[in-house]
Image (tube, rainbow, N blue to C red):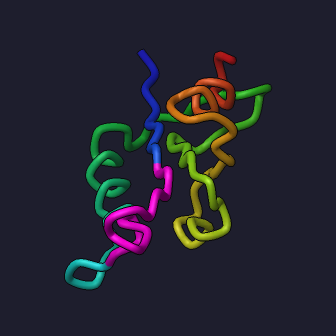
Amino acid sequence: MEHGVIILAGRKLNRMGTDKALLAIQGKTVIQRIRDEMGKAVSGIEIAFDDRPVAPFIIVTNDPDSYQFLGERTVRDRHPGTWSACRNTCWA
């Protein structure tokens, strides 16, 4: 069975005043920590999409440029929730 990880990083700034996923804790951002921990569950798994290898992560966010440093596939969140994530998977 193939597994991948979709991380929803909506970037709502209401109460915190900043993007929570980009806050650093002991030298790593929250999103890096999530990616690294989830990567343990999907490491070594390759997901095929149109005969091309695709990273096992999809980061869904309103601001894809802010997450480019991760080196993972990022997609713009077109609608609240999981719509954009599901629309950009290899089974879509």
Residue 22 image offset from top left, x and y in percent? 41, 71
Q: Nearer the viewer, residue 3 or 14?
A: 14
Q: Is 67 left, or right, of 75 in this rendering? A: left
Up/down of 35 relative to 48, above or below: below
In the displayed structure, 71 sits above or below 25; it is above
Number of numbered discs on residues: 0
Characterize the magenta stretch by its predominant secondary structure: loop
Which residue sits furthest right? 50
Residue drawn where x is 60% and y is 26% of the image: 83
At 32% from the left edge and 57% from the top edge, which residue is drawn?
36
Residue shown at the point (75%, 35%) measured from the top left:
52
Q: Quadrant of residue 35?
A: bottom left
Which residue, as the protein is rendered here, is positioned at the far left? 26
Residue 71: x %, y % from top left? 58, 64
Q: Quadrant of the N terminus?
A: top left
Answer with left or right where residue 26 lies relative to residue 56. Answer: left
> Does the magenta portion include 11?
yes
User: Nearest the camera: 20 or 35?
Assistant: 20
Q: Is residue 18 left or right of residue 36?
A: right
Spot occupied by residue 21 in the image (x, y as percentages of width and height): 38, 64
Q: Is residue 50 left or right of residue 64?
A: right
Q: Outermost residue, bottom direction?
A: 27
Q: Position of residue 20 (x, y in %)?
A: 36, 66
Residue at screen point 44% across, 64% down: 13
Within the magenta stretch, is there residue 7? no
Outermost residue on the front side: it is 14
Quadrant location, the C terminus: top right
The magenta stretch is: 9-23
Q: Look at the picture and state if 6 lies above or below 13.
A: above
Which image quarter: residue 69? bottom right
